[in-house]
Amino acid sequence: MNLFDKYYQDTPDYFGSYPPIHFKEAYKRYVPFAGKALDLGCGQGRFSKFLADKGFEVTSVDLSAIGIQQLDSFARTAKKAIVAIHDNVLNFPILAGRYELIVAATILDHLSVRDARTLAGKIYGGLAPYGVAYIECHTEGDAGCRAGRGEKCLAVSECRSQIRHFFCKGQLLRWFEKGRTLSYEEAEFMDDAHGPVHSHEFARLWTQKV
Ligand SMILES: C[S@@+](CC[C@H](N)C(=O)[O-])C[C@H]1O[C@@H](n2cnc3c(N)ncnc32)[C@H](O)[C@@H]1O
């Protein structure tokens, strides 16, 4: 059982029941359509559930067997259009041009930089024309990264050990430079949604296939 299996088994909605408010606001601006969505590293499925409610047919992929079981059972009981797949995102075939929306919320940073770069290319390739992707990942300003460099940081996420690559300034944006950038930010925030209150710095990108 991996760390996320344990967290998900002990706590329903470990990262919260809904996507964060900044996602929902940006969604209103950038996603005036439905269709097929892919949620990579979906965890217990807070993004997938939101997207299914908005009319998307969602495919959700995660390495946590527990998270996927929970999401699958939710989808069957609530009759939601979510197909929950237990797989490594690196093995899951992302068909070119298939998805109107792809969400990759803190998954690229859970991979080696090489694998993350490859997956980023597949994400962009998987978008339908004018399709939109939301990508979020930890940056070098994150408390977990700074603590790893020996800086004193009181508030480090309990999931820090799972992050393999902290993105440097502008790196995520450069990886998706082929797309039309709808918005990009690198921002620090306090996170009280899971574990002891801690701080994060994330890069958050909304990009569109052109
Ligand atoms: C921080 S959680 C984020 C979950 C979800 N995206 C959310 O925001 O609620 C990261 C997730 O990535 C999953 N994960 C990590 N490496 C993975 C891989 N190689 N393939 C599939 N899932 C992976 C973990 O199991 C975990 O559920």
Image (cartoon, rainbow, N blue to C red):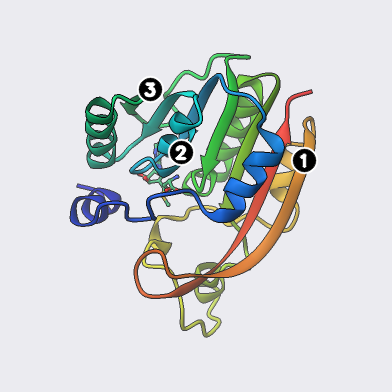
Q: Earlier in the sequence, mark 1 or mark 2?
A: 2
Give the answer, above or below, for where 129 lies relative to 105.
Answer: above
Residue nearer the viewer, 193 or 143: 193
Indicate the secondary structure of the residue bearing disc 1: strand
Q: Which residue is mark 1?
A: 182
Q: Of discs 1 and 2, which sits in the foreground? A: 2
Residue at figure coordinates x 30%, y 51% from the top left:
4
Q: Say which amino acid is labelled 2.
A: Phe
Residue 131 rendering spot, x and y as whole percentages: 67, 24
Q: Earlier in the sequence, mark 3 or mark 2?
A: 2
Q: Say which amino acid is labelled 3.
A: Ala
**Ligand 1 lies in which image quarter?**
top left
Give the answer, above or below, for where 173 lies relative to 20.
Answer: above
Q: Of discs 1 and 3, which sits in the foreground? A: 3
Label 3: few (<14), some (14–19) or many (≥20) C-alpha neighbours in 10 Å: some
Residue at figure coordinates x 57%, y 20% from the top left:
99
Q: Which residue is mark 2?
A: 50
Hey, which quadrant is residue 200 in on the image? bottom right
Q: Which residue is mark 3?
A: 81
Q: Is mark 3 within 8 Å of ligand 1?
A: no
Residue nearer the viewer, 176 or 27: 27
* Labels in figure, total: 3
Residue 171 rendering spot, x and y as whole percentages: 72, 49
Hey, which quadrant is residue 95 in on the image? top right
Indicate the secondary structure of the residue bearing disc 3: loop
Q: Say which amino acid is labelled 1.
A: Leu
Residue at figure coordinates x 75%, y 53% from the top left:
170
